[in-house]
Amino acid sequence: MKRLAALVILGLVFLRPAVGALPGQAATASAPILLTSCGQSPGPAIIKVVLQRLGLPFELDPLATSSSLQKKKEAGQPYGSIIIVMGASLKGMGAAGISIDDEIKRINQLIQEARKQGLKVIGAHVEGMKRRSQGAAAGDTTDEQSIDAVAPQSDLLLVNKEGNSDGRFTAIARNKNIPLVEVEKNMDLVEELRKIYGK
């Protein structure tokens, strides 16, 4: 009986989907990629390095708008997907002369246009808990507002596991039936994005 129980447990371990991924859903996307931010944090720079390493065609535009998507489509060079990096930087937004409300409005319009064009939207959070409310100054909720704006509207969530230690992204993924992929370290993003883009 003990042996049977052990075999059942072992079977369940090997039958589990990839870390954090919801079963029955394919986590795939197409290039070229528009890489942008919701909150002007340094996070997109991390994704940029990974995309360069994989040789995937992309454009980094921290302030991309819905018209950015429209212009590319009109030029006959439409994007295949969008990666929106969550996490806010008061310094970054200040340098750009914008607020978190401006960012949320821009991102909502961007995602709305992406839906019209049938583009996959990937919400990424790669800076861990330092880019969450736990790492922010007292009263600063901009990081969480960035997550609220992007995560529930994403087709796929790609997050650093440490930044999901409170289960915030897991709850959103389950509630919205969104595939969630977690990485232990950001260097693991190379393999996960390789899988996502079939590289």
Image (cartoon, rainbow, N blue to C red):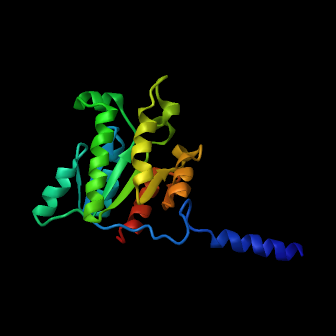
**174, 129: nearer the viewer:** 174
Q: Quadrant of the C terminus?
A: bottom left
Q: Quadrant of the N terminus?
A: bottom right
Residue at image point 47% right, 23% down: 139
Residue at image point 48% right, 60% down: 178
Total numbered circles? 0
Q: Can you give x and y, in whole percent of width and height, for residue 127 in the image?
A: 44, 42
Q: Can you give x and y, in whole percent of width and height, for residue 76 in the image?
A: 12, 67
**168, 165: nearer the viewer:** 168
Q: Is residue 107 visible?
A: yes
138 sits to left or right of 104: right
Does 26 sit above or below residue 155? below
Residue at image point 32% right, 47% down: 108
Does 138 sit above or below residue 106? above
Q: Can you give x and y, in whole percent of width and height, for residue 195 in the image?
A: 42, 68
Residue 95: name its quadrant.
top left
Q: Can you give x and y, in whole percent of width and height, for residue 110 in the image?
A: 27, 50
Residue at image point 32% right, 34% down: 101
Residue 12: name its quadrant.
bottom right
Does 162 sit above or below residue 18? above
The residue lying furthest to the left in this view is: 75
The residue lying furthest to the top in this view is: 138
Q: Is residue 45 visible?
A: no
**4, 155: nearer the viewer:** 155
